Amino acid sequence: MERCIENLFIWNEARVVVNCVYKMMKRCNDYGFKDQIQRAAVSIMNNIAEGVESGSDAKFVYFLNISRGSCSEVHSMLYLCEDFNYCSKEERTELQNRIKQISAGIVKLKYSLKKGRDM
């Protein structure tokens, strides 16, 4: 069965996060910070996509691990966004909750991929 990124909840949620981060950073003049959080957010989405097309479950798990690391990076940087007044506490919390859902979904997908290999 062919995998399709558009059918993955985690990829779709990552796309929402990317759009939210880009909107949040529109008024940010700290280009290093802006670039870092935007690249980390895009990394969540793109590593899921790259894993889908990687050709093996083991490689897919590898890319999911990178994606999960990027989730943690964005989660952490969102506190700074709040501190630097790029977002409200509510906006930060909402995005962090989305990221937690993505991360949990990645864990579940990794488990199912590993379980499939063990059979």
Image (cartoon, helix red, strand yellow):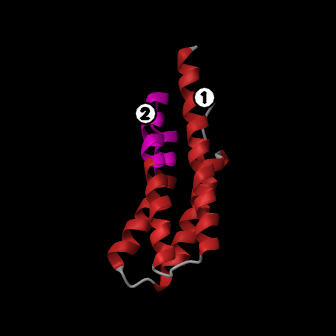
Q: Residue at x 44, y 67 (%)?
A: 38
Q: Main secondary structure of the magenta part?
A: helix
Q: Is mark 1 on a helix, strand or loop?
A: helix
Q: Dot 2 surroundings within 10 Å: few (below 14), some, or many (20 or more)?
A: some
Q: Residue 36: which disc?
A: none
Q: Which of 65 and 88 is in front in this view?
A: 88
**Which amino acid type is shown beneath numbered disc 1?**
Ser
| Magenta range | 47-68
Q: Which residue is drawn at 53% across and 19% down?
A: 117
Judged left or right of residue 12, residue 39 is left
Q: Which residue is drawn at 37% across and 73% down?
A: 33
* In magenta segment, residue 12: no
Q: Report the residue marked by disc 1.
A: 112
Judged left or right of residue 41, residue 90 is right
Q: What element carries label 2?
A: helix
Residue 15 picture location, percent across and down: 58, 60
- Is there any visible trace of residue 4 in the rendered image? no
Residue 16 picture location, percent across and down: 61, 63
Judged left or right of residue 46, residue 88 is right
Q: Is residue 42 above or below residue 55?
A: below
State which quarter of the image contains the C terminus. top right
Q: Residue 59: which disc?
A: 2
Residue 10 picture location, percent across and down: 61, 49
Q: Dot 1 surroundings within 10 Å: few (below 14), some, or many (20 or more)?
A: few
Quarter occupied by residue 36:
bottom left
Quarter occupied by residue 91:
bottom right
Residue 2 picture location, percent across and down: 61, 35
Q: Is residue 102 above or below residue 81?
A: above
Q: In this view, does 102 lie above or below 38?
A: above
Rounded to the nearest angstrom, the CA distance separating label 2 from label 1 is 14 Å
**Which amino acid type is shown beneath numbered disc 2?**
Lys
* In magenta segment, residue 58: yes
